[in-house]
Amino acid sequence: MTGKPVLVNVRIIDDNPKRFVAKATLAPEVGNGVGPVLVDCGGEAGVTLLVTHV
């Protein structure tokens, strides 16, 4: 792990708690793979899988 962000240019599209949507760009160092993305929004936690194919 490099300590550098995996996602850059993060943009919040819809901040509705029932269907939060954000878009981002992968950092150039990211290769192919699958990994979890964990989010903590003031005590509310969420997780999703990030699948990359470059």
Image (cartoon, grey):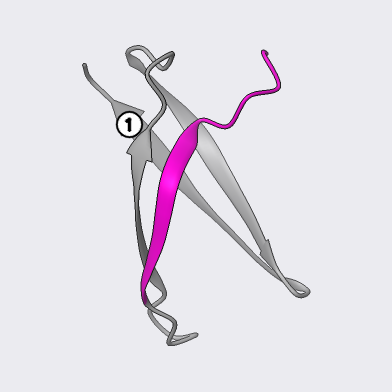
Furthest residue in direction front, as rendered: 9
Magenta includes 11? yes
Name the spot of residue 14 as percent of width and height, x first: 35, 79
**Who's the residue at 54% across and 43% down the image?**
37
- Rendered residue at 53%/37% (across/down): 36
Frontmost residue, 54 versus 27? 27
Answer left or right for 53 relative to 47: left
- Residue 23 point in image, percent of width and height: 32, 56
Which residue range is magenta in the image?
1-13
- Mark 1 packing: few (<14 Cα in 10 Å), some, or many (20+)? few
Give the quadrant of the C terminus: top left
Q: Which residue in the rendered view is the most extreme toward the right?
A: 43
Residue sticking out furthest to the left: 54
Image position of 36 with respect to 28: above or below = below
Q: Quadrant of residue 50?
A: top left
Residue at 32% in and 13% down: 32
Q: Amino acid at mark 1?
A: Val
Residue 34 x/y as whole percent: 40, 25
Q: Which residue is mark 1?
A: 51
Across the whole image, how many numbered discs are drawn on residues? 1
**Above/below status of 9 relative to 3:** below
